[in-house]
Amino acid sequence: MKMKALVRFLTLVHVSQQYSTVLVNEGVESVQLPCKSSRLPEDTTVVWKRHGSHPSTVHQHHVSYLQNQHYSGRTSMSADALKTGDLSLTLKEPHHSDSGVYICHWYRKGEELFHQDLVLLQVIVLQHNSTIGVYEGVKSVQLPCQSSWFLSKDTTVVWSRIGFNPSTVHQHLDEKEPRFQNQHYSGRTSTPTYALITGDFSLTLKEPQLSDSGVYTCHVHNNEKEMLRLIVRLQVTERPIFPPELCLMLAVCLALAVAALGWHKTITVSSVVVKEGVCFVKLPYKTIVPLPEDVTVEWSRCAPEPMRVHKYCNGNNDLIRQDEFYCNRTKMQEEPLKTKDLSLTLRDPCYRDSGTYTCTVHKDRAVWTQKVVRLRVNVPEEVVKVGDWAKCVTLPFKTRARLPADATVKWKRFELSNSWTVHVYQNGQDKSEEQDDSYRDRTKMMKNPLQAGDLSLTLINPSHGDIGVYTCTVESDGDVIWKRSVRLKLKAIGF
């Protein structure tokens, strides 16, 4: 965080206070955020908070509290902090996402005893021992960790994930089953059987998911002596809908089929990328192949799910068997066989339209020509800024598309590994019982939003804790058919 941001924060809270800066490398066991005072009465309440986080409480001394789950099990203070005046906070396994402004404040009810200090924590990401990239959907991925040390039977090997709670991913202890494991990884991890003999502690993670992306630590220790500590960054990415290598394979296979069956026609492949919210997108296909007047032109979608998109037959558009999702949304040029322009115009492209489309020209089961088009509809992220004392703010989401009357609208907020259900609209009414408590009675949508095509959300009395990324999804029959993201930021105040 830059110094200007810190000064801006000081201006917003209107409090004169000290601040200190702590720099630490990602991957260390712990870091201490300093906070000193003179001896304090026993009934003094000491609270550590993080600016801009929700919930904001990081740690509260000797009192049960609503702690941000990102810090669960990772914070501690000295037991005699009030006697010694050392109110410093110890944070275990600091992660890059822990960087930010922390507030140490203490108060005593009934008296004018109030004070707070600021600590700017910056967790520096060093060059990791290795970085592993893999597509979601593969059978497994291996995170490397090897040692040249001679290891005895009482050696413990722990794979953990920095910033995760509980942090343990896998524990190898004298060839026994892993214990104290985060349930997210239950049944999906393993290390070699004779790891203590070979020194190979590489972790095999089955069926890696997008949520598995993060920084992992391989920690080898004997009793209290650390033998090895390696850091591995895992990046799991979504597999492209129609990878280039698959395009090449398809083209080769079809070329062989053409040669085998004696066809003298062609197949081509292209990609189209468009942002959701545009009026229309064109799936291009212009051919030089001579086409008889009695051929049939069919546009279909083969991935991620088969769907009938558009059909042109006997000089007319035959849309009787068209999938309902594309009803009244597709159009071809007049007399496409004469112009040889078989392009398809798709109106109001949305998130669900992303996929692989095929245009096939055929007659009596014989294919004359074919075109494959990969369409990707990107979901734009809008930015909305809100002032410090605003009574409400609107997160916009308007669409011209025809939305199913029985669709479910969900607004959610995401920050780090946490998520909150902000608002749910289903079966013609708001579902307040599904909201997170912090947003109950603070959100509002217009009446009949699906019919109006206005899914905008009004957030009442926004605060610093509401800053973040909000995602609105429209779901029908379990599928996400529309999606929009809005980033809510704090409006800068001059100083």
Image (tube, helix red, strand yellow):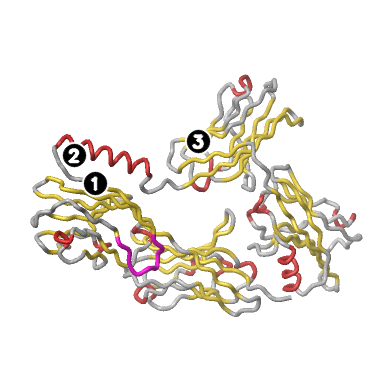
- Residue on which disc 1 sits: 267
Residue highlighted by disc 2:
258
Q: Quadrant of residue 88?
A: bottom right
Residue 20: mark in rendering? none
* Of pointers 2 and 3, the one earlier in the residue sequence: 3
Q: CA distance from mark 3 to mark 1?
A: 36 Å
Q: Are marks 2 and 3 in contact (CB under 8 Å)?
A: no
Start and end of the magenta stretch? Answer: 274-282
| Label total for image | 3
> Within the magenta stretch, is there residue 281?
yes
**Of callouts 3 and 1, which one flags the residue occurring earlier in the amino acid sequence?**
3
Query: Residue 152: image x %, image y %?
Result: 69, 21
Amino acid carrying mark 1 in the image: Ile
- Going by the image, does 47 lie left or right of 142? right
Find the distance from the CA under tag 2 to the CA under tag 1: 9 Å
Contact between labelled residues 1 and 2, with CB atoms less than 8 Å apart = yes
| Residue type (three-letter) at the residue carrying disc 3 | Val
Where's residue 2, x and y in %?
71, 62
Answer yes or no: is residue 406 visible. Answer: no
**Image quarter in which the C terminus is found:** bottom right
The CA span between labels 2 and 3 is: 38 Å
Up-down: is 29 above or below 494?
above
Q: Identify which residue is drawn at 79% across, 72% down.
A: 15
**Looking at the image, which is closer to me, 322 or 110?**
322
Crowding at label 3, few (<14), some or many (≥20) Cα neighbours within 10 Å? Answer: many
